[in-house]
Amino acid sequence: MNESQSAASSAAVAALIDREAIRACLARLARGEDRRDAALIEGCWWSDATFDYGVYKGDFPAYLAWVVPGADAIRNTQHVLGQSHIELGSEVARVETHVISYHRVDMGAGAEKSGERDTCIGGRYLDRFEKRDGEWRIAARTMLYDWEQDWGSAADWSTGVMGYPFHAAYFGGTAKGDFSEAFFA
């Protein structure tokens, strides 16, 4: 391998490492949001970052206060990430990531749609990542909404799944204190 091929190979490996670091950051953030884990979330955003979710926007401290502890009405949430299109620069990357997010929402009593309901949102995160001191984190995020579906009254998980009862208390949720925290400890 000549010097030019070696340099190209090294650049390609560096780009792969950077792209994987960005994807890993996105996965940690989704995990942190689902568990309302402030430490996981803080490790994915720069402290001077900004966000715009259409219904709420601001700086990172406002985002963290919005997500953790999370709305009392949102009993359970799950973010499933799809493909990420990454346009990588040396210190800045622009990233579009598809997301489907599920939310179990307590609508309260007396409303037209009362009780717990399941809703699902499909959209895309538009993130500007910045690499500082060798680490990639989100510097700015805009959420684009492609669709939303109200799935109706929430299932009663206390009965198990498809008629089979759960054999342990740790099934049926991803909120703070969920079983995966002990699994990875």
Image (spheres, rainbow, N blue to C red):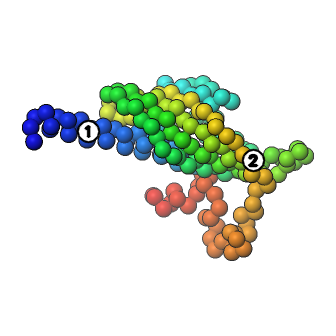
Residue reaching furthest to the left = 2
Taking the spot 74% from the left edge, 51% from the top edge, the residue there is 151
Relative vertical location of residue 178 with respect to residue 84 in this rendering, above or below: below
Question: Of marks 1 and 2, which one's residue comes earlier in the chain?
Answer: 1
Left or right for 102, reference 60: right
Relative vertical location of residue 120 with respect to residue 137 in this rendering, above or below: below
- The percent position of residue 167, horizontal first and vertical second, equals 64, 74
- The percent position of residue 101, horizontal first and vertical second, equals 62, 46
The residue to which callout 1 is attached is 12
The crowd level at tag 1 (other Cα within 10 Å; few <14, some 14-19, many 20+) is few
Counting labels gives 2
Taking the spot 68% from the left edge, 69% from the top edge, the residue there is 161
Q: Residue 159 carries which label?
A: none
Determine the image quadrant of residue 61. Answer: top right
Determine the image quadrant of residue 94. Answer: top left
Instruction: Tell me the quadrant of the picture where the C terminus can be found.
Output: bottom left
Left or right for 12, reference 127: left
SS category of the residue bearing label 2:
strand
Q: Inspect the image, locate mark 1, and give the three-letter code of the amino acid beneath it.
A: Ala
Left or right for 107, reference 84: right
Pick the front one: 78 or 48: 78
Q: Inspect the image, locate mark 2, and give the three-letter code of the amino acid beneath it.
A: Asp
Q: Which mark is residue 150?
A: 2
Taking the spot 46% from the left edge, 58% from the top edge, the residue there is 184
SS category of the residue bearing label 1:
helix
Pick the front one: 40 or 150: 150
Taking the spot 36% from the left edge, 35% from the top edge, the residue there is 135
- The percent position of residue 42, horizontal first and vertical second, equals 49, 37
Pick the front one: 15 or 135: 15
